[in-house]
Image (spheres, rainbow, N blue to C red):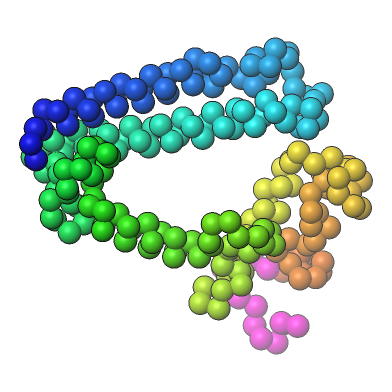
Amino acid sequence: MSDRGEFRRMLERERERLRAAVRALDDRSLGRTLGESISESSTYDQHPADIGTETFEREKDFGLREDHKAALEMVERALERLEEGTYGRCEGCGRPIPEARLRAVPWTAHCLECQRTLEEAGAAGRGRPAGEDAGPAFSSFTDDSPLHPVGFDGEDAWQAVARFGTSNTPSDVPGARDYGDAYVGADEEVGTVQRVEGLPDPDRRPGRRRPPAERS
């Protein structure tokens, strides 16, 4: 490596740029509530579609801030490697990282071959190619996996939290009568197959197993 001081300056400039970007996002929108950012005293009377653009922009800013923070963490780790004397050496194979790659991505911790291997392993773990057609909901969970069968799957998890409230209204869900039913699957018995299974057993005490003769 020709000049560690040059790479240090590159990393420090990138660190300042990322810090400024995070501060700008906080000052511009994320430092205020959604109601304050759209000059509304309350969003209670607003349907989510009425403020869809504002909500999207706010979610985008949250995503950008997280991306900047992740990049900032990589830059900080690269500066630590400079202090430790390990900068420029691949953390995967231990070989020197080509200087051309360091100039292009000064915060990188892996050579091109190891980085490609990491990205391919991550893509294989997801098992979902980019640009594929949308599949059915919850299909990425393990409920259909023969290797990892679970009793409480992704759909059950969604129903468990959806009952506390979603952006749906009763008119959005067939059969819903009020906001407490305004989510898909509200009519299902969560955790039981039949309604009778949800009834308490008055003779059951904690820690006591019923004898076989008492079991139906």
Residue 37: give x, y in percent of width and height: 64, 16
Q: Main structural element of the magenta stretch: helix, strand or loop?
A: loop
Instruction: In the displayed orientation, state which residue is furthest to the bottom.
Output: 213
Q: Viewer-proximal residue, 136 or 35?
A: 136
Q: Residue at x 13, y 35 (%)?
A: 82
Residue 13: give x, y in percent of width and height: 26, 23
Residue 125: give x, y in percent of width and height: 44, 64
Res 145 → quadrant: bottom right
Q: Viewer-proximal residue, 167 or 187?
A: 167
Query: Does 206 sit above or below residue 8?
Result: below
Q: Quadrant of the C terminus?
A: bottom right
Res 203 → quadrant: bottom right
Tell me if I can see residue 109 in this picture: yes
Which contiguous range is marked in magenta?
204-216
Q: Residue at x 53, y 31 (%)?
A: 62
Query: Does 128 sit above or below residue 52?
Result: below
Q: Viewer-proximal residue, 216 or 144?
A: 144
Q: Viewer-proximal residue, 104 or 155?
A: 104
Q: Residue at x 80, y 30 (%)?
A: 47
Query: Does 1 sit above or below residue 28?
Result: below
Instruction: Decide whether residue 206 is among the magenta residues.
Output: yes
Query: Does 187 sit above or below residue 10?
Result: below
Q: Residue at x 60, y 60 (%)?
A: 132
